[in-house]
Amino acid sequence: MLEATNLTLHYGGSQILHGIDIIARPGAVTCVMGSNGVGKTSLMNLLAGRHPRSGGELSLDGKPLGRVSAQAMARMGVGYVPQGRAIFPMLTVRENLETGFACLPRAERAIPDEIFESFPVLAEMAHRRGGDLSGGQQQQLAIARALITRPRVLLLDEPTEGIQPNIIAQIGRVIAALRDRGDMAIVLVEQFFDFAWDLGDAFLVMERGRAVVQGPKERLSRDDLHGLLAGHQAA
């Protein structure tokens, strides 16, 4: 559904990404892994339209994309949950969710029942301000807000960061359910190895803006991949 080849990205005079290829397929989770500062978030920003690529090709549903804004990508069905959540602390939970209406036709501007079924705490706290929620609850809100847009591609940047184990497990169940539905492609940036390995169908390991390991799960060794990532983090 979302395919990129030979992506390059610069911030000013610094090159951040060097020839990255990535494919996100419906009904599958593509995991992007690596230590801090290797370009994972930059890649997600590029895929979400938040930063223009320097080179390479990007296509959605087989249709090549030029320089497309984040708003246009959202309207085309690319949902993004950024690192750090980026919720609106002074808006209520319901108002935060309703910000997702911006890229929907007026007739579709409603919060689906599945949102509150997936994240019951958001129904309980619908009238609480976003800034009053715990970190885990804010992460659930950020994911739910992205799902409001009815995405066909969901980009998740470190959804387990700073989250308590019981909410990590719940988020994992939601991601698995979205994957198993079969109509959504998911790209997951994740440092928590066990979480990524359990959910992932394909993996991309980055180092200094380059892909050093890439492929479907069945072609990769869990122990080798874990050892490689542990070595990068230790370095």
Image: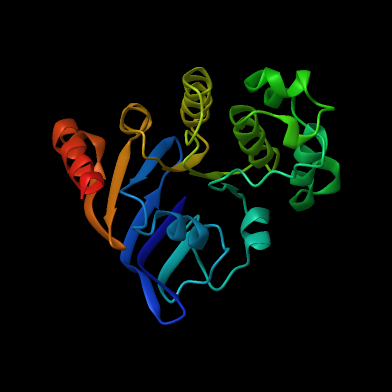
Q: How many marks?
A: 0
Residue 220 at least partly seen? no
Horizontal arrangement in the rendering, residue 208 relative to residue 147 (left or right): left
Horizontal arrangement in the rendering, residue 120 relative to residue 206 (left or right): right
Name the residue nearer the viewer: 228 or 117. 228
Q: Quadrant of residue 96?
A: top right
Horizontal arrangement in the rendering, residue 50 relative to residue 126 (left or right): left
Return the x and y of residue 200 as percentages of the image width and height: 35, 34
Residue 121 drawn above or below residue 209: above
Name the residue nearer the viewer: 35 or 48. 35
The image's colour scheme reads: rainbow
Q: Quadrant of residue 222?
A: top left
Q: Please tell me which residue is depicted at 85% across the width and 47% down the height of the picture.
A: 106
Return the x and y of residue 67 as percentages of the image width and height: 56, 73
Q: Please tell me which residue is depicted at 69% across the width and 39% down the height of the picture.
A: 145
Return the x and y of residue 223 as percentages of the image width and height: 15, 32
Q: Please tell me which residue is depicted at 50% across the width and 23% down the height of the picture.
A: 164
Name the residue nearer the viewer: 1 or 161. 161
Horizontal arrangement in the rendering, residue 8 relative to residue 233 (left or right): right
Residue 234 at least partly seen? yes
Q: Please tell me which residue is depicted at 61% across the width and 36% down the height of the picture.
A: 143
Residue 227 drawn above or below residue 168: below
Q: Quadrant of residue 25?
A: top left
Residue 169 drawn above or below residue 233: above
Return the x and y of residue 30 as percentages of the image width and height: 38, 42
